[in-house]
Image: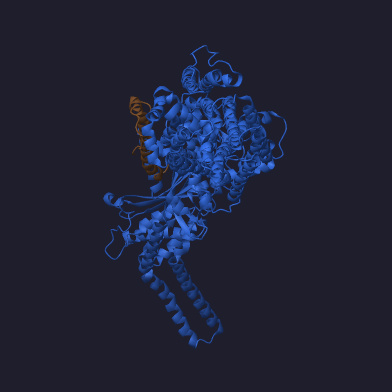
Amino acid sequence: MRADPAPAAGVALFLLALFLLATPFARWWLSAAPPWYVPYLGWAAVIALAAWLLERWGRRGL
Amino acid sequence: MAFSLPTLLLCGVAYLGVLFVLAYAVDRRWLPRAVAHHPAFYVFALGVYATTWSYYGSVGFAAEHGIAFLTIYLGVTAAFLLTPVLLAPLLRLTRNQQLTSIADVFAFRFSSQLAGVLVTAIMLAGILPYIALQIRAVAESTLVLTGGGHDPRPLAAAFCLVVAVFAIVFGARHVTPREKHSGLVVAIGVESLVKLGALLIVAWVAVDLAFGDLGGLSAWLAEHPERLEGFYDPALEGPWLSLLTLAFAAAFLLPRQFHMLFTENRSPRSLITASWGFPLILLLLSLAIPPILWAGIALAPETDPDYYVLGVAALSGSQPLTLLAYLGGVSAASAMIIVATLALSAMTLNHLVMPLVKSLPHQEPDLYATLRWTRRLLIVMLIVLGFAFYELLDRSGTLVAWGLMSFLAIAQFLPGIIGVLYWPRANAYGFLAGVLGGALIWLDSVLLPALVGTEPFFLLGFPRAPADETALYGSATFWSLAFNGVLFVSVSLFTPQRPTERQAAEVCHDQASPVAAGALEAASPAQFVVQLTPVTGEEAARKEVAKALGDQGLGWGESRPDRLRALRDQIERNLSGMMGPMLARMIVDERLQLDRSARTALAQNVRQIEEQLESSRNRFRGLAAELDRLRRYHRQILEDLPLGVVAVTSHRRVVRWNTAMEGLSGISADRALGSRVCDLGAPWAETLERFLAAEQAQQHHDQATLPGGDTRWLSLHKTCIRESGLGRTGDTLVIIEDITPIRRLERELAHSERLASIGRLAAGVAHEIGNPVTGIDSLAQNLRDETDPELVRESAEAIVEQTRRISNIVQTLIGYAHAGAADERRPQPVNLRELVDEARRLVRLSKGGRRLEIDNQLPAELELPGDRQRLAQVFVNLFSNTVDACPEGGRVAVSARLVGDRAQVRVVDNGPGIPAETLDKVLEPFYTTKPVGQGTGLGLPLVYNIVSDHGGEFSITADSGGTTAWIALPLHRAGPARDGQEPSEEVD
């Protein structure tokens, strides 16, 4: 039986969010003071990725 | 621009009135179901998360702490990214166990009413300031638009009244979580849409007013680089991670979020849509904040940054826009208060009120009405308490500060919920210690300073309180959660876990809990009603049992123990939704008792265990998954076996009924499983009962007439089922083979054999008939000339005598030839001696048979049950064989003796015997030693089959002195199971 990949994908997305928000990388991009909408673009990209992965999982049933 | 108070009041009431109508229309099903139940409403309804704090306060938060305001949204996004491992398992748990609040979850997992009480108390203390915040925001926003100068409290009170009525009418209509509040979900979804739309429109107008367009905003930011630095810098220094953690916990632990996410969820599929849809809504909401902030800075409206949304809208000079912005705030506040009070009222009812009511020695005449009205009263009380907090709390602080106070309180359940989902070893002591420790720090650092003005951390004495309010929350978050987590883990590790906790932990970890031992005392759904009535009242008891029967797809006539156990579990789950898991368990344990002294055999729980394994199979991993595959493979072998397989417990309950058995019997497995054998109906009840009661392990050629009149011939085998290490379980496995086609073939062959033997008898028959015919002919010729009356009379009598002789011969032949229909006959007593005489007469019809000497030594009184014609054929065939073996005339002796309950018949001839190498083959069909055309090879196989059909045994021995045929026939046929002996109930 193949293991369900959804939990791993969810955790990977969560870790990606942590990397973007709560690591020295976050300090770097915050200190770089990018245009104000850049954080929103990153956020939207994570949401799009989540939608793609989780919808695929959802089609196979929770 | 200023509005009059009555105008705003009227607009607010009218807006809520429109939502009333919308919710009413949905509840009345005036809207198409596809629209009302669309997942979009569910996703938007989750927007109840964004209260006036987000709507108004985020701008103020951003003004003070820059991009840190985003943490309140990003933390939620992080939580929703974990949907597969966090939200989906929680949804599964709450749906399966009908848990309606986070207090229910903890009370269920830790099997502790105290856990439910503590969680409810902390929730109340933590959420009341949040409700107060909404009241304050509505009151202050009204003051902003009216220009101030009057007491906002009457307006706040009026707002509370309207919201309370809405919550009562649309949120407390049902007492069970199974009945969703569709109208409420749609109304809250629309409110979210209104506040999102209002905020985006205000942001667009603000940019237009202040900068002309987005390019103008960029140019302004380029001209004022300190604004962009001020936007990012606070995040580098402030409690960024702590705020993310608080928002992460709030995303699903806040009562209103839990209620919308899990209790009002109609389909698990909607959660998937929400997992990205809700963060998208939050992104859009927060996208409006920076432009409004910078437009506010540029335009400098006469309001605090917390109310820039209103100030900037008012500066636009557009009354509709300003009203829309105001109504967006009313939406945010009213939605939060309505859903939060609904969730808190259910929690308070289940964990604070019901345990007290239960202890009262008084029976409620109408459980549903009592629950509904108590819940409505609690909603009013909670809103009144929120108003009291609004009066008590220091109103000089920011809106965000009051919101964070609530966030920190509910974050204390974060270690516990992780334990619920992922740490089976966690126990109630650890949970209570952790939550109490964390709540103490929350009280010390946040609540008491806000309520009575004490110094943060004065009770603990450390750490030193930061001067900045938000930094204080960073410190309080770390210390409270650290203290909480350490206590939770350490106390859980060093204190024992109760069996009920262990069982609940297995359920929470998606593992099937072991089926409880013991036999249910109630034997029917009607008895369930009788037993529940003293606690719930008769009407509620009847409705709950009916609901549970519907859930399980059962009827009121159900009596199968495993189905009744499932019914009991369903009732517990349904009651849990109404009055909490602990009380539901208490009621079910007390009223629908299990006789735990009774050992429940594994076989009786086979169906429940298999259902649990089936529902959990997707979650098996590694060796467990392999074992499950093995189990399914073995089960499939039984299912696919082309033989009927029936497993029966020692109490005559059917626990296995495979596909072949379904086809053979026409009884579905669903109907047969769990039924008593005697309830299976004709002919299976009688057939199985008789075979189970019989000593023999095999029963060949058993006849069964199906309800449609079709007759089947069955071969049955049985064996005792053993359990490894325990020996015999008392259960029996029965294999049933449908041998009807073989039987029909045999019958046809037997008929052919009979016709063949008649052919062989033909010459003898002609001779036997020829003699009397010749005699008749002579007598008739003489009669023509005879005149003496005396001689005429004698001649006539002689003719009659000769015709009677012919008639006897013909009748014997006809009876013998038409024996094919005998299979369906019931056994009749047959006198063996007379039977052998009849066979002798038949054989003597043949030419060779007249030379055969038959010595019938059978006692005259020997009778046994059987089919006379078929048994006659046994002896005809045996005598015919002797005739063929002894053409010069032989001798046959037939004798018998009783051995036990059988008659042992011995047929001995003086023929040449049968060679040893041939003896093994004589019972095989079509094997013959006679010349071609003289034998069919079916004589002895037919004898064997007839004797077997009669429950007897046939064998042949031979030597040079002759051949001996041994026929053992039972003196009595096995009858049905002992009348009146019903199997006892499911107890050993």
On the question of residue A4 being in view, the answer is no
Q: Relative to residue B383, is residue B962 drawn left or right?
A: left
Q: Which residue is depicted at the point 48% across and 60% down?
A: B710
Please identify the quarter of the rendering in which residue B177 is found.
Answer: top right
Q: Relative to residue B698, is residue B398 drawn left or right?
A: right
Look at the image and tell me in which quarter the N terminus of chain A lies: top left
**B445 or B950, which is in the foreground?**
B445
**B199 or B790, which is in the foreground?**
B199
Q: Which residue is depicted at the point 52% across and 31% down?
A: B306
Please identify the quarter of the rendering in which residue B372 is found.
Answer: top right
- Residue B901: x percent and y percent? 50, 46
Report the chain shown in brown.
A
Q: Relative to residue B929, is residue B826 drawn left or right?
A: right
According to the image, what is the colour scheme of the structure? by chain
Vertical side of B568 occupied by B763: above or below: below
**B563 or A2, which is in the foreground?**
A2
Look at the image and tell me in which quarter the C terminus of chain A lies: top left
Report the chain shown in blue.
B
In the rendered picture of this protein, how many numbered marks are placed on residues?
0
- Residue A31: x percent and y percent? 35, 26
Q: Which residue is depicted at the point 40% across and 38% down?
A: B217
- Residue B501: x percent and y percent? 52, 26
